[in-house]
């Protein structure tokens, strides 16, 4: 038995933010019915295609463990089918443009009338307000949520991060909201609306930068590298390069082989509790008692000198050798792992964080598995569905269409079925 056995999700999501949410719910055991347009389906099926004639990795890696149901919601028979689906499902998840469901005739009031226990969950770019109708993509959300303004180096342009904190991050927030709403429904019997704006999700993930904004009003941020360089602070949280955001100074440092390997780097944190161990490792035992280096406040103006000395040592070791030396001593370090190294990591494959999946059109591919682990069961990652693969199955098993009624719906053109 899985955590969400018996929960049925009506999945009206596409691209990344919504599918991230519904895929996680599917991994947790929910029956996720992905509603797609006949003939075309989710736009990502045909985006960034690497195997001609097969669904793209963009689609397959966001739609594991789901069933595909193709439906023309503009057709009268299609509207009839959709109404029945709403009656039979527990959660409707959508990331359409604002107002799209209302124009379809299935806004919240209609959904609630059809199924008072329904939880209707939405991803939108912005929450209610002056930007509510704006179209938002990943990088827009990162910029509007404070991530870009605080990412990069102080003397260069704002940067977006490679982690999809706007899309996938918001999908994870929405999944948490759905689970809370399901628990609330168990206690009250009532469904409700759940909204996860992308801007809000990014802001939540940037909370330490909002912390620093308030600290900045009291004086300079002394753990930031620019303090030691004597660069004045402005009136907003600056870009801090690779400084640690946790109050313990940290930097990305070169390791052995950096001249030819773009990922031969480690992240090294000079945690106060292990300062004496750091001094011994890098061959600076005199710094342990020198009043100009012995305490964290004394070291703050000298962080460039400190990290230059540490880097002279890390350049003599591979990033993995740095870990082997430092970890037993409690010194916080971590290798800069490339996506190639991550995809080939035996430990990550053993825990199911990285998986290989067989697909009838594209063959075997590597994907991300469920990031949440359970003691009572393992999460099985199943391939993404072909377009319309489960349409007839859902019409029959979920909605109860059979015989002539099933033929009527299939032949109406309101649904599409796999050849």
Image: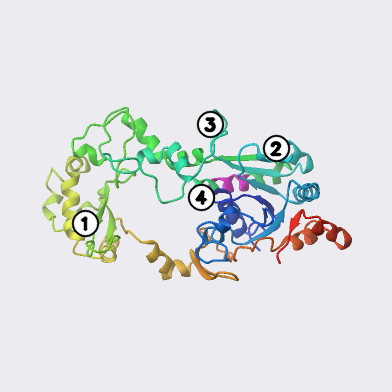
Give the extent of the magenta segment: 172-180
**Residue depicted at x 43% and y 39%:** 143
| Secondary element at image label 1 | helix
Residue at position x 65%, y 36% in the image: 99
Residue in the foreground of this view, choosing between 239 and 213:
239
Write down the residue under mark 3: 131
Disc on res. 233 = none
Tell me how far mark 3 sits from mark 1, CA to CA: 52 Å
Q: Residue 151 is drawn in which quadrant?
A: top left
**Magenta segment includes 311:** no
Vertical relation: 320 (above or below) 107:
below
Local SS, label 3:
loop
The answer to whether residue 176 is magenta is yes
- Label 2: which residue? 102
Q: Is residue 150 above or below residue 129?
A: below
Q: Who is closer to the viewer here, 96 or 10?
A: 96
Regarding mark 2 in the picture, which secondary structure is present there? helix
Mark nearer the N terminus (3 vs 4): 3
What percent of the width, then of the height, locates residue 51?
52, 67
List x then y, in percent, for residue 43.
58, 53
**Residue 277 badge:** 1
Report which residue position mark 4 lands on. 168
């Amino acid at each position: 038995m899985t955590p969400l056995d018996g929960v049925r999700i009506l999945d009206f999501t596409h691209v990344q933010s919504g599918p991230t949410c519904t895929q996680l719910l599917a991994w947790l055991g929910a029956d996720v019915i992905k509603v797609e347009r006949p003939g075309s389906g989710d736009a990502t099926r045909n985006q960034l295609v690497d195997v001609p004639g097969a669904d793209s990795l963009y689609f397959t890696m966001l739609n594991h463990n789901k069933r595909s149901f193709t439906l023309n919601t503009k057709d009268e028979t299609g509207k009839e089918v959709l109404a029945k689906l709403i009656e039979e499902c527990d959660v409707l998840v959508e990331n359409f443009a604002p107002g799209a469901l209302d124009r379809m005739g299935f806004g919240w009031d209609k959904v609630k009338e059809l199924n008072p226990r329904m939880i209707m969950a939405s991803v939108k770019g912005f929450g209610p307000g002056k930007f509510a109708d704006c179209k938002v993509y990943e990088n827009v959300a990162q910029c509007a949520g404070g991530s870009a303004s605080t990412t990069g180096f102080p003397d260069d342009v704002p940067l977006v991060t490679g982690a999809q904190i706007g899309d996938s991050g918001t999908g994870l927030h929405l999944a948490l909201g759905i689970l809370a709403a399901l628990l609330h429904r168990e206690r009250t019997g009532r469904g409700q609306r759940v909204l996860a704006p992308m801007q809000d999700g990014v802001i939540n993930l940037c909370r330490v930068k909002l912390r620093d904004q308030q600290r900045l009003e009291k004086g300079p941020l002394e753990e930031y590298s620019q303090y030691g360089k004597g660069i004045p602070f402005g009136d907003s949280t600056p870009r801090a390069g690779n400084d640690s955001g946790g109050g313990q100074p940290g930097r990305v440092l070169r390791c052995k082989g950096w001249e030819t390997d773009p990922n031969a780097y480690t992240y090294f944190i000079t945690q106060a509790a292990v300062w004496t161990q750091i001094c011994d490792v890098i061959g600076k035992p005199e710094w342990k008692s020198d009043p100009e280096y012995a305490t964290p406040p004394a070291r703050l103006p000298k962080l460039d000198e400190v990290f230059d000395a540490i880097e002279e040592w890390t350049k003599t070791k591979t990033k993995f050798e740095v870990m082997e030396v430092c970890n037993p001593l409690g010194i916080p370090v971590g290798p800069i792992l490339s996506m190639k190294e991550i995809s080939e990591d035996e430990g990550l494959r053993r825990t199911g964080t990285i998986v290989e999946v067989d697909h009838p059109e594209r063959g075997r591919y590597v994907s991300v598995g469920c990031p949440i682990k359970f003691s009572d069961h393992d999460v099985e990652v199943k391939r993404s569905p072909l377009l319309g693969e489960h349409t007839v199955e859902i019409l029959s098993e979920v909605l109860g269409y059979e015989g002539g009624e099933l033929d009527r719906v299939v032949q109406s053109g309101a649904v599409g079925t796999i050849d």
